[in-house]
Image (cartoon, coloured by chain):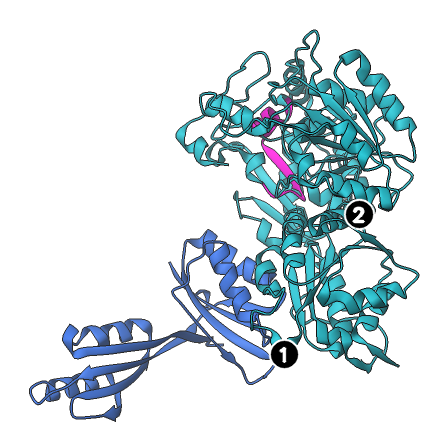
Amino acid sequence: MKLNGAQILVDCLKSEGVKHIFGYPGGAVLHIYDALNACTVIDHILVRHEQGAVHAADGYARVSGKCGVSLVTSGPGLTNAVTGIATAYSDSIPMVVISGQVPSAVIGSDAFQEVDAVGITRSCVKHNFLVKSADDIAEAVKKAFYIATTGRPGPVLIDITKDATIAEVEYEGYPETIEMRSYQPEVKVSAEQVAKAIAIIETAKKPIIYSGGGSVIGNASQALITLTRNTGFPITQTLMGLGAYPATDKQSLGMLGMHGTYESNNAMHDSDCIIAVGARFDDRITGNLEKFCPYAKIIHIDIDPSSVGKVVGVDVSIIGQVNEVLNALIRGLETKKLPNIDAWWKQINDWRLVDSMAYKTKQGVIKPQTVIETLYEVTNGDAIVTSDVGQHQMWAAQYYPFDKPRRWINSGGLGTMGFGLPAAMGAKLADPDLDVACVTGDGSIQMMLQELSTMLQYHTPVKIININNGYLGMVRQWQEFFYDKRYSMSYMDALPDFVKLAESYGHIGIRVEKEEDLKPALIEAFKQKDRTVFIDIVTDPTENVFPMIPSGAGHHEMLLAGRDDMASTNDSGLNLV
Amino acid sequence: MRHIISVQLENESGALSRVAGLFSARGFNIESLTVATTNDPTLSRMTIVSVGDDNIIEQIVKQLNKLIDVVKVTDLTATEHIERELLLVKLAVNADSQSKIESQLDLYDAKIIDASEEVYTVELAGKSQKINDFINAFNADEVLEVSRTGVTGVCQK
């Protein structure tokens, strides 16, 4: 069958089972859009900015577990997409991004809308391809989906020259399988390493499970729950891992790290056996490496060998799919008698009494923490929550206990402001039956506002919870603590009227200024099942995120709200981001 | 410590820049890098000399393995291996220095591949240390130009 390159591409995407593409047309991809126009099984979502397209594909992938797909044109289309690609790369999200490229004959001539797409994206993709011939499209697409979705997932870019989309060639159908001698993602779990890990676990007096994004992305939630329940060990989860183990369960100590709970961080510090599951010892988790977990033997479970030993030395590493490794551990531990850890639990329960998530309320002021608690109540803890980046992100993570995986969608690795709104749109398309809330702030929301327009066009009703404190709150907090309250450029004057703004985009806008109006407003908003509602909530402008491990400190050196209102750090701490 | 890392990778455009980009993005050091195709025309072999402690070298090997185009990574330094580097050097000669220079060339088994009245172009293959010693055997004003390939190597087994 003779087809042009664009038609081949669309057939490949159809054969991959792609249902949604997020994109934006332009000169280099016009043939692809023409072929897409003739295709009835793929819905294309026309975003308003390419960064929004990639974030939406990302949110879609995180909720559905499928590969997100995005289509952009050459030059600025591609450069606008780069932030989205880097965001997905940081959080290991499976994604295929297709970009147009100028005709192969003019590559390198500084042609109109030409950029070196594979060069620009090289360091923020799992892999990329430049395709200059229609004959090579099908194989590149097959490889791209294979690479993006296997092993440690990540974004893959396919840059296709315009002439390759135009040329008509013989097409023999989408390849069913692909073999790559240089890429073998299947790893057999080493029984020997599992046995070594069990030997450490068997003698642990103060064990803790430290679980990260790999448990979510690797669909290991059920195995994680079984291991935790069978062992009776406490479990703490990273920002990226929230939901893999139910947060409301009694063995859950909550999040760890910079804004984690007192009990999580102290348990990590005092532990003699840490089982790291799909987590990568990010600097937001470890704090000062010299003070990190001084007494622990560390077992590190990860699909990516390069994660092991990158930041901290470990005692036993087990490479493989998190799910498979956990099941091997579960089986191996079945016949073992584990030591009594009642004394450890007593210690942990004493730390819990500190009640590190307590916060002071103030008459006449809405506390951001209360907003999240109310959101939890109104949605019965069963919504998908996306967030942007900053204080509101931490409060959402702290005060909305997630009991299921793929419900908490945030840019944890790259920390991309503007992620939340398009991700919410993608999330809603992935799971239209669930309520989707986008927790954002007055700074972040303005980075991707234009997607409100897309959300109307494609009927993706989400509830935008804008924690409006008039500040770039996390920047303001650090300036208060570490820069003697010199608030350089962290105050944003001239905010728009978000209610009118939402209305002008065809949505509902609600402004909440009094605490007594908060819950009724949220109830009303979530009643509007088929409408996007922007709830602009005026909150305490100077509230800080606690508890906190200041940069440079150890896990046992936490600051608590109302007890250490002012943090400080040392020179080495200031060097950290 | 100095390590010689041998990388077999798909002989595709962009593969070299993936490796070079990895080293600069992650702050790894490169002392030298050589690359050419092998007897299998679909494969290239790259030999990288880097300096770092065990943790850094471990990360380099792991990160190289993570590149999709990379087929195999071997730390030659960890095994019995042979390493060679090729030097082309232009030496200034005159009637006074000629015999001294020629005896140095004999000592190192270096070969004159081009000669004029005032300049010898000399080639020498050997371990990097031998090349260094050879260059240092001449006075600074005798060494006009140096071009070295960087190290290439193979396992002995």
Q: Please, is residue B102 above or below residue A107 in the view? A: below
Q: Nearer the viewer, mark 2 or mark 1?
A: 1
- Distance of label 2 from label 1 (alpha carbons): 36 Å
Please give the residue where the numbered disc 1 appears in the rendered image. A105
Quadrant location of the N terminus of chain A?
bottom right
Residue at horizontal 71 percent and vertical 8 percent from the top: A364
Q: Please, is residue A55 above or below residue A563 in the view? A: below
Badge 2 element:
helix
Amino acid identity at mark 2 = Tyr
Specify the subunit that label 2 lies on: A
Q: Which chain is cyan?
A: A
Please give the residue where the numbered disc 2 appears in the rendered image. A60
**Which tint is chain B?**
blue
Q: Residue A565 or B122: which is nearer the viewer?
A: A565
Query: What residue occupies the far top of the structure in this picture?
Result: A363
Q: Which mark is residue A473?
A: none
Which mark is first along the chain, 1 or 2? 2
Q: Is residue A253 visible?
A: no
Q: Which residues are magenta?
A: A263-281
**A550 inside magenta stretch:** no
Q: Please, is residue B144 above or below residue A562 in the view? A: below
For mark 1, does the 10 Å Cα neighbourhood hold few (<14), some (14 to 19), or many (20 or more) residues?
Answer: few
Amino acid identity at mark 1 = Ala
